[in-house]
Amino acid sequence: MYTSEQQRTLFEQSKQLLQPAAGLPLTEDAFALATLLRQLIRFHEWRYSVQNDPVISDFEYDQLYKQLEAVENQFPETHTADSPTRRVSPDLTENFTLVAHLTPMLSLGNSYNADDLNDFDEQIKKLCNLPKDAAIAYCVEPKYDGGTIALVYENDQLTRGATRGNGEMGDEITANMRTLRSIPLQAAFASRGIAKAELRGEALIRKDNFEKINKKRQDAGESLFANPRNAATGALRMKDPKESAARGLEAFIYQLGYAIDATGNNVMQSFQSHDESIHLLESLGFKTPLAKTGVTQHLPATKTCANIQEVIDFCLAWQDYRDEYPYELDGMVVKVNLLELQALCGYTSHHPRWAIAYKFKARQATTRLRDVEFQVGKSGAVTPVAKLEPVALAGVTVSNVSLHNEEFIRTKDIRIGDQVLVERAGDVIPYIVKSLAELRDGTEQPVVYPKNCPVCHTPLIKPEEEAIWRCENAECEAQVVQRMIFHTSKHAMDIEGLGESTIEKFYKLGWLHSIADLYRLDYEAIAKLEGFGEKSANNMRSALEKAKNNPVYRLLHSLSILHLGQKGSKLLAAEIGHVLELKDWDLERYQEIKDVGPVLARNVYHFFHTDHNIALLQTMEQLGVNLTQTEDDKKPESAIDGPLSGKSILFTGTLTTCTREQAEARAAAAGANLASSVSKNLHILVAGEKAGSKLKKAQALGTVEIWTEAEFLDRVQAPEASE
Ligand code: IVH
């Protein structure tokens, strides 16, 4: 589109014009100035909206825009129809006019797996009369999930924008399309001998922008959009183009649908391939699948593949990275690259035979809400959980979804028996987007919040500052079990082999009454349990023995004190020599710790002034659990001089002779810097047992030294030895 030389000049000219204004020019200069400003503004719109990489600030852009407005207002004869100031026309579009597309806008066939894509490839070869082992080149592009648009350019000017409509006819939305800065109002098609062209593309809203729009709507008490696509298709057809512009729509152009020269001859044949036509569109200033869009770190957005296997690999890889893409995608589109072969394939009445969509696994689905159950958490919070008719979402079956709190159920008007729209995006926990009130048949029942704890029947209380109801009976069976589950979890004492189902089982057997009982389990009895055996009983014993030596911040965190997270636990641990000192602290002493607020201070104070909690900790200490602050508790700063000075180090997998914290403390004492992930900058990876993806990544990089735990211990002088 622009050479670097041109870009430099445009940038410098912009900077000159951004100097304090020297007043308006004389009439004879006005034309030149308006032309220059238009050129500069177009350039900056392209950098910002197409390249996603502006070279001046929004403020500076506004200054240039205002200068152009001023010149055009002062000298109306300088105004042109394709001026960036004419993007938003003041007229309201009352009704949309139906317009006929220059060629029908067809749909796409679908594929869902490698077999489907192989079948497609086979079919193409048949249609093109090519041998079975021929390699066909395909372009693979994102399948954007927004509102489909068709743009017509005549004599290099944007003359019409339309929605897809029924494929033959669509709504004319030119005024709205002109507000999109990613759509050039003029483009040099004539340079390729094209007098009239129709382009196909998709208008989208970035996912982060969509979140902001919904947040604003929520604050204004308006209904929320279910997804970015709905927000985008709505924006396309706004009556007021200014509104449309305000939603931040962007247009990706993925197809040159029609092109004729000045004499009306079809010039599509002058292109050899689809990717050639996309490169042309890119060079004319359009945002195409070639645009830099943020996933470049792992995958390009589009690829011309040499054969179907490359297509399959690319599509499967994209399925894993789709969440990194700033826009919503519902799959990839695979297109035969050579136009000559496309012509041999032809069309059905529904779709081109030379293209197919590869659909990602659906992430939204509707299902019936069977019931709502109320679950009691470790601190007594009562959470409503939707019991759904099981539904497959992005590869997993979802049947339980949290409804968070009473307010969530009320604002979404969720009723038992409703059809609900469920979404599972990436690693995000599945959630209910909305209930489909229009599908109700009158049998749906409102969700009734319990007045008493569903487990111990204590009346529930809703603290003023909170959104949730709580069971305040600390001895409530549900809370006791949840606290044990949390105690052994990875973030707390990290006791492997003692997960949710084992704890529930031991609890039912009457072996566990409090977390102290975890440290006096009868391993002989465990070994005899069905599904356990000697080996897992022994593993459990070593995991528990190891946990006894955990630093005290882990123990503090594992006690399930309301609002006391890992960070707070570390702050607290740093102030004490022994956990039981905390029973002698008064409330003010807690509040003296920086970053400990009054609510947390009260909760911790309350915990350590409750007799049975102190008794519990004393029992745990008798059973060998460490309550004493050790040097390892405080991660030492890296030593300046040591065997690992200047090296970055990371631990992965399970260490057998010491805890992760102890190993990190030793590494730091030996001068190493602790890294948080595997990268080119990492020097050493210590791989313990069952090391997984981090080890693989380090091996693949080839630049990281990989040590066993024993090697690591050899290299660092153990603190005991140096004392
Ligand atoms: S090509 C004749 N390419 O998918 C060409 N379509 O079912 C047919 N879509 O609503 C379309 N991204 O708007 C093509 N890179 C892409 C696309 C794409 C999204 C949409 C298209 C239409 C639907 C086709």
Image: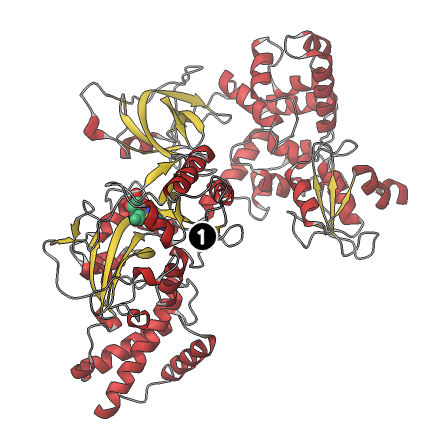
Q: Which residue is drawn at 44% across and 34% down?
A: 113
- Image-quadrant location for residue 223: top left
Judging depth in this view, the residue of 78 and 193 nearest the camera is 193
- Quarter holding the C terminus is top right
Q: Residue 616: x percent and y percent?
A: 64, 22
Residue bearing the label numbered 1 = 302
Height in image: 39 above or below 556?
A: below
Q: Residue 433: x percent and y percent?
A: 32, 35
Height in image: 508 above or below 278?
A: above
Q: For the residue marked with disc 1, what is the amino acid? A: Thr
Judging depth in this view, the residue of 246 and 696 nearest the camera is 696
Question: Does the beta carbon of the residue at mark 1 sit less than 8 Å from ligand 1?
Answer: no
- Image-quadrant location for residue 106: top left
Q: Residue 298: x percent and y percent?
A: 53, 50
Judging depth in this view, the residue of 538 and 359 nearest the camera is 359
Q: In this view, does 430 lie to the left or right of 106?
A: right
Q: Residue at x 27, y 21 (%)?
A: 417
The answer to whether residue 158 is visible is yes
- Quarter holding the N terminus is bottom left
